[in-house]
Amino acid sequence: MEFFLFILRRFLRLLLTIFIISTIIFFVIRVIPGDPALVVAGIDALDEDIQAIRVRLGTDVPVSVQYGRWLADIVRFDFGESMISGASVNKLIMERFPLTLALAILGIVLGIVVAIPLGVLSAVHRWSFWDYFGMVYSQMGMAIPSFWLGMILLLVFAVKIPLFPLFGSDSLKNLILPAIALGFARAAVILRLTRAAMVEELSREYIITARAKGLTDRMIRYKHALRNAMIAVVTVTGIQFGYMLGGAIIVEQVFSLPGLGRLFLYAIYQRDFPLIQGGVVFIAVIFSLVNFAVDILYSLLNPKIRIS
Amino acid sequence: MPEKRADSTLEIRDLNVSFIQGEKEANALRGISLSLKRSEVHSLVGESGSGKTVTSTCVMGLLPTPPARINTGEIILGDQDLLLLGEKDRREIRGKDIAMVFQEPARYLNPTLKVGDQITEMLILHLGMEKSKAVDRALEILELVGLKGGKRVLDSYPHELSGGMKQRIMIAIAISCNPSFLIADEPTTALDVTLQLQILNLMLSLKNTLDMGILFISHDLRVVHDISDWISVIYAGRIVESASRETLFADPKHPYTKLLFESIPDADKRGKRLQTIPGKVPDAENIPGGCAFHPRCPIAEEICRTSQPETKDLAINNRAESHTAACHFIGKQWKN
């Protein structure tokens, strides 16, 4: 019952989020200068043609009417058609999403695999080689822009040493380099957090109890401290994953990957209102769903907020 | 019950511990000696900062070195000096032969582990029990510490239990491997008065059932009165007086002990102004020369500033029991 209420509350919050986000995005793109009809028709078009396009796009009526239509469409999960290509927004997003999803999963997995063990090692052996290595890594990870890292990776591992393909997106091999470029900075954040959380947990009183019980260092670190440290790490990692699902514009651009990021980027260039709106709402939904999953995971790790 | 070793006493001899911080050296323990017998409660009483916790941490082998440094001393359990053992051997003794109960159970229990796991992990580790056998044993231990609810309690997380229940769990963890000695570091200080009494009674009954020696650390002479067989008073890293409870309460010799008694509120002192001891315990970095207590002592004379008093045994020859105190003017009276 409690669990059901929790889900229901979460669902209502999701709806509210979608409503607020869609309202904001609707008005924001209409405030940005640039008439989509002009983009479609071209600069030399006749006034009548432009007017006709506006009618077709639905931008001829007052903004309030457009807003009403937009909300009515959202309720039916209908985000309309792209102004430019005419394809349905849903279809365009769904075509691109698998690639973005694969990239995000690969990126976060790489991030976790590097960051959590290194973070734990840094915390357990403070001021050791691994700790310094971790510090240097996290500084670099946060300082190096992903586009630069992406280009370097391409240059080294696709051009000089052709281990990976230069472009394309049809196999896992195509995704390795972009996932590294994407996960590198994420790993830096997760690493710092893991180290900090682990250091804090190791200084807590229950660790003294664990030592007084005569437990081995392994048990103290991994059974007692890590469990508690993971509470914070899981939350942040989940949010990072949520961001990545919205598409990685820069990395997709560098590796010429047709993911969501690029789709939305071009939609913005072309003032493709329905696609921008649909895209933003989609990202908001995905982000909320990831947060929801994180909350459930969080409650499993942290008995104090267990929901059922 | 697992078989016991033949270690009937835990003896601390002349323990001297410093904390080193850069150039500074803080002399936390300056020659502590005390002995703890099975089935006996030996209380270590003193104000905060006097070295009680350093003593217990050192006995447990949990003192971080550095910054701490053990200058001299022995901690004898059975026939071995614990201070000479390697970390692995010490770890095997911790929890199994000498266990510890802490002040604030809420902070000293792992919030994300079920209390059952917190008990059984020791049984599995130290006694090599199977998980299911360890659970059975944990249920028995719960009974011993007076917790009803069996399996349900084992499946709880610490935050789901009350303060008193948490302290009982702490005790359950400590006694799970049937240790010969238990160190209780102010186990009742964080609890309210009615619970204090329950926990003290529990510890007393466990001491008898399990034939366990308890080193009871407290700042509160009233609490100590209810539970102790023997009492040692610690001041600035030295034991200034040590005697059986009856002797100490009837005839305290050291001025510090006397002042501690005078600062206890009780019915006799109703209407009178309660005594406090002026000043405070010196920092371990700046311990006064001579007798460390002289700046606060009402009977201090020149010699107290210059020479540290020997610990003298005041026991009269025909009495077996010893009563030691370290003061140049043992028994000297003063007027308030």
Image (tube, coloured by chain):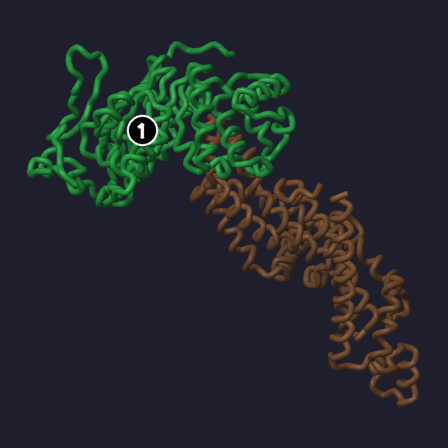
Q: Which residue is at the front of the view, B52 or A210?
A: B52
Q: What residue does disc 1 label?
A: B44
Quadrant in the picture for residue A16: bottom right
Q: Is residue B157 left or right of residue A65?
A: left
Quadrant in the picture for residue B103: top left
Q: Is residue A40 left or right of residue A296?
A: right
Q: Is residue B13 visible in this depiction of the protein? A: yes
Residue at point 78% right, 65% down?
A19
Residue type marked 1: Leu
State the residue lying farthest toward the front. B271
**Residue A42 location in percent, x, y?**
84, 83
The quarter in which the C terminus of chain A is drawn is top right
Residue at point 16% right, 20% down?
B314
Q: Is residue A259 visible in this depiction of the protein? A: no
Q: Is residue B333 left or right of residue B220?
A: left
Residue at point 29% right, 20% down?
B35
* Residue B77 drawn above or below residue A11: above
**Residue A133 location in percent, x, y?**
49, 47
Chain B's colour is green
Under circle 1, the secondary element is strand
* Residue A103 drawn above or below residue B325: below
Q: Is residue B288 left or right of residue B105?
A: left
**Residue B184 location in percent, x, y?**
40, 28
State the residue lying farthest toward the left. B302
Q: Which residue is at the front of the view, A201 or B49?
A: B49
**Chain letter of disc 1 in the image:** B
**Residue A157 location in percent, x, y?**
65, 52
Chain A's colour is brown
* Residue A253 drawn above or below residue B244: below
The quarter in which the N terminus of chain A is drawn is top right
